[in-house]
Image (cartoon, rainbow, N blue to C red):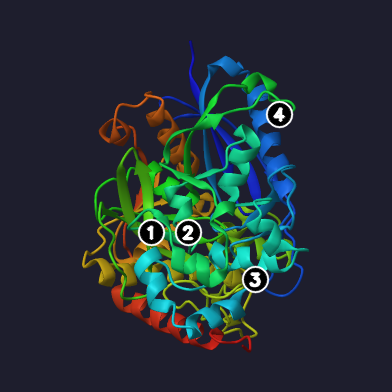
Amino acid sequence: MRRFILSLDQGTTSSRTILFDLNCRIVDSAQSEFPQIYPAAGYVEHDPYDILESQLKTVREVLKRANVLPKEVAAIGITNQRETAIVWEKETGKPVHNAIVWQCRRTAPLCEELIKSGLKNHVQETTGLIIDAYFSATKIRYILDHIPNGQERAESGELLFGTVDSWLIWNLTGRHATDYSNAARTMLFNIHTLDYDDVLLSQLNIPRCILPEILPSSCIFGEVKPCIQGLEALAGVPVAGVAGDQQAALFGQACFSPGQAKCTYGTGSFLMMQTGNKPVKSENRLLTTIAWGIKDQISYALEGSVFNSGSGIKWLKDELGLISDDPEIDILAESVEDSNGVYFVSAFTGLGAPYWDMYARGAMLGITRATTKAHMCRAVLDGIAYQVYDLARTMEMDSGCKLIEIRADGGASVSDIMLQFQSDILRIPVNRAKCVESTALGVSLLAGLAIGEYKDLDDIKRRWESDRIFTPGMDSSKCGSYIRGWHRAVERAKSWEEN
């Protein structure tokens, strides 16, 4: 009998379902975008029901189009936008507030208060993170403060919190759970003791009873309930793999040895290096995080986050109307030699690592009358590569290990010109995976591992394939000049929004 694994890839702007066979080949996929909600400048929300319904819609589409029988689905894996916070009623499953998205900056003032209270070192030592509105903890506090009787209802056990993976697990199986990789992004989880931190829970007055159970990334989280409309036939199929999107991509890229790194070019860009079974403390404002948990083994990683990269392409298309579809940006960018001195800093919602400036804002600099939309398109793609360059150099300093290659994946990694520029300025090869859907692939492999379809990590490693390797071709002095200009542009974008 044929056997398949369904990967539910719940992202920031769309939900997707990808069906993999056991040879890691994509059999079919479906995608459904859902609305982005911007209540105020710097605020980003999602309707949790939009997240759920768009995800279930894509599952139905894939099963129907691929002509796959439910009994042929061996397992389900879930990967998700991380840090996004959802609070719902335990009894009804009804959300009490829109999801506050990882990009949202509304809790920046609360983060400032936490820093002033002296929690900075404690947060880094226990969670591996820095205090920032990016993470879930202050979002939970905001929601409880902005719904009627929020604190009282939380303390009485009426409410549950979860990141997006927990929301999907709850609706599919009825279990309130998450995995180590997602728990590590809440700014409430001690990555050394593998439990929620009492000091942080007390400081933010977040009741432990609203938090999800924490499980390994590769294990049985539960079975699909028989009452999900249109998916009744999937009842009993195990949800067997769960990981945050970037950790799932690291797994999907078969980065199982310390020092191996991948970069996912999506709505944001995320550079992550595997560091083995011990966390590496960052001295340069990167994040120390959990990559995944398999049985009783925890793997750690260093991570740098670019909050807005592919979202810059979407901005050119949807808000400015400079391109009609995503591939057009490459056509225009390839029509010019370079950006003609134009730099784009995509700090729509602040700057992530290594700057961590909650008050930076987007900037297009160096514009003259000679600037064309082709130059602006080139500047947007170059801006993605520049920000990853900053992360890579910082990661090398923290780890004491020089990167010898970056494995690339994600929707924006289809851009040849962007990956070539990335290789040029980093002076190392950039290896694009044959399956650029490494996030979905990674969680399908975690699920397959849990149910015994894959023997071990070596079995998985043998299945990884490269599509194309980009190698440096630009003169190093020219690269240096471009990078100096980039850093001048970043300085002008920083601290733009008044605190």
- Picture coordinates of residue 155, whole percent (x, y): 63, 58
Alpha carbon distance from label 1 to label 3: 39 Å
Residue nearest the viewer, comparing 155 with 265:
155
Of badges 4 and 3, the one in the foreground is: 4
Q: Do the residues labelled 4 and 3 touch (CB within 8 Å)?
A: no
Alpha carbon distance from label 4 to label 3: 47 Å
> Can residue 8 be seen here?
yes
Alpha carbon distance from label 2 to label 1: 8 Å
Numbered tag placed on residue 228 in the rendering: 4
Q: Name the residue under label 1.
A: 289
Give the number of marks. 4
Which amino acid, mark 1? Thr
For marks 3 and 2, the one nearer the N-term is 2
Q: Do the residues labelled 1 and 3 touch (CB within 8 Å)?
A: no
- Picture coordinates of residue 264, whole percent (x, y): 46, 54
Of badges 1 and 3, the one in the foreground is: 1
For the C terminus, give its image quadrant. Answer: bottom right
**Left/right of residue 109 with respect to residue 296 in the rendered view:** right
Q: Mark 2 points at which residue?
A: 185
Q: How crowded is mark 3: few (under 14 residues within 10 Å), some or many (20 or more)?
A: some
Which amino acid, mark 4? Ile
For marks 4 and 1, the one nearer the N-term is 4
For marks 4 and 3, the one nearer the N-term is 4
- Picture coordinates of residue 233, whole percent (x, y): 66, 19
Q: How crowded is mark 4: few (under 14 residues within 10 Å), some or many (20 or more)?
A: some
Indicate the secondary structure of the residue bearing disc 1: strand
> Can residue 385 be seen here?
no
Q: Are marks 2 and 1 in contact (CB under 8 Å)?
A: yes
- Picture coordinates of residue 276, whole percent (x, y): 25, 52
Q: What residue is rendered at 49% in x and 49% in y?
A: 245
Numbered tag placed on residue 373 in the rendering: 3
